């Protein structure tokens, strides 16, 4: 499973990228606002840093304007994935932009039927939001499974990009289901390395090393 980092924080992206933990980046207007940077400027910097797809989201609501914004974003770098919402206008924009050879990430997906439409419109990525479904007592992981089954049934090439990931269990479950990509905040990716038994075992090893005056250098 590919790891995308969901942030516009250059420092956090660089740290994870140096460790080989970044296959791509996803951003949205909320993350751009949090960064305090100009969208074109920070997106270009991310694209220069990361080799994989960098999702940059349009802010228009009608298809014509989405297409114009998408074309402008696509000119930033070859690894831009234009991010459009899963609305009827978003699907129209997806079809045009993908036909022009651009990567397109269709976001805010909350049903398998929406994902089916996005695949037929030529989406490179579909972004189902796990955490937001969990918030309203629906099973976000069940949606990932349903999309996986549908895409496999018909050979759709659209990649399932599991989004709104909030816990390490979300990551594991998405990997078991067969999501192609997951995107998560930097802190969630870091937590994947944590386990209470690892900490406990390391603590004991350090005590024993001190007791035995074990030194390597």
Image (tube, helix red, strand yellow):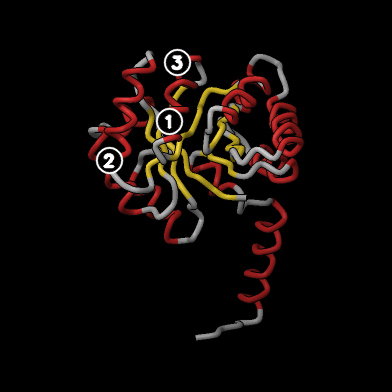
Which numbered tag is attached to residue 89?
3
Where in the figure is residue 23, as x and y percent of width and height? 49, 52
Where in the figure is residue 191, as x and y percent of width and height? 58, 47
Q: Secondary structure at mark 2?
A: loop
Instruction: Tell me the residue that label 1 is attached to.
Output: 83
**Most foreground residue, 129 or 165:** 129
**Most foreground residue, 113 or 172:** 113
Q: What is the tally of numbered marks visible in this picture?
A: 3
Q: How would you rate the neighbour count of disc 3 (Cα within 10 Å): few for under 14, some for 14-19, many for 20 or more?
A: some
**Most foreground residue, 208 or 51:** 51
Q: Secondary structure at mark 1?
A: strand
Q: CA distance from mark 3 to mark 2?
A: 21 Å
Earlier in the chain: of badge 3 and badge 2, it is: 2
Location of residue 11 with respect to 119 vertically, above or below: below
Q: How would you rate the neighbour count of disc 1 (Cα within 10 Å): few for under 14, some for 14-19, many for 20 or more?
A: many
Identify the residue shown where x is 47% and y is 61%.
19
Q: CA distance from mark 2 to mark 1?
A: 14 Å
């Amino acid at each position: 499973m590919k790891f995308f980092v969901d942030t516009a924080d250059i420092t956090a992206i660089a740290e994870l990228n140096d460790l080989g933990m970044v296959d791509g980046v996803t951003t949205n207007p909320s993350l751009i606002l949090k960064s305090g940077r100009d969208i074109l400027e920070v997106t270009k910097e991310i694209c220069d840093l990361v080799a994989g797809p960098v999702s940059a989201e349009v802010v228009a609501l009608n298809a014509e304007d989405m297409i114009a914004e998408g074309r402008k974003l696509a000119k930033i770098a070859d690894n831009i994935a234009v991010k459009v919402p899963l609305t009827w206008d978003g699907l129209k924009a997806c079809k045009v932009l993908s036909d022009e050879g651009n990567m397109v990430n269709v976001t805010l997906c909350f049903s398998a039927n929406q994902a089916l439409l996005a695949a037929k419109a030529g989406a490179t990525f579909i972004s189902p939001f796990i955490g937001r479904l969990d918030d309203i007592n629906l099973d976000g992981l069940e949606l990932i499974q349903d999309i996986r089954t549908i895409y496999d049934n018909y050979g759709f090439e659209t990649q399932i990009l599991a989004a709104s990931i909030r816990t390490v269990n979300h990551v594991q479950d998405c990997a078991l289901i067969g999501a192609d990509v997951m995107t998560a905040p930097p802190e969630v990716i870091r937590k994947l390395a944590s386990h209470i038994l690892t900490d406990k075992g390391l603590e004991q090893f350090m005590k024993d090393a001190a007791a035995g005056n074990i030194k390597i250098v």
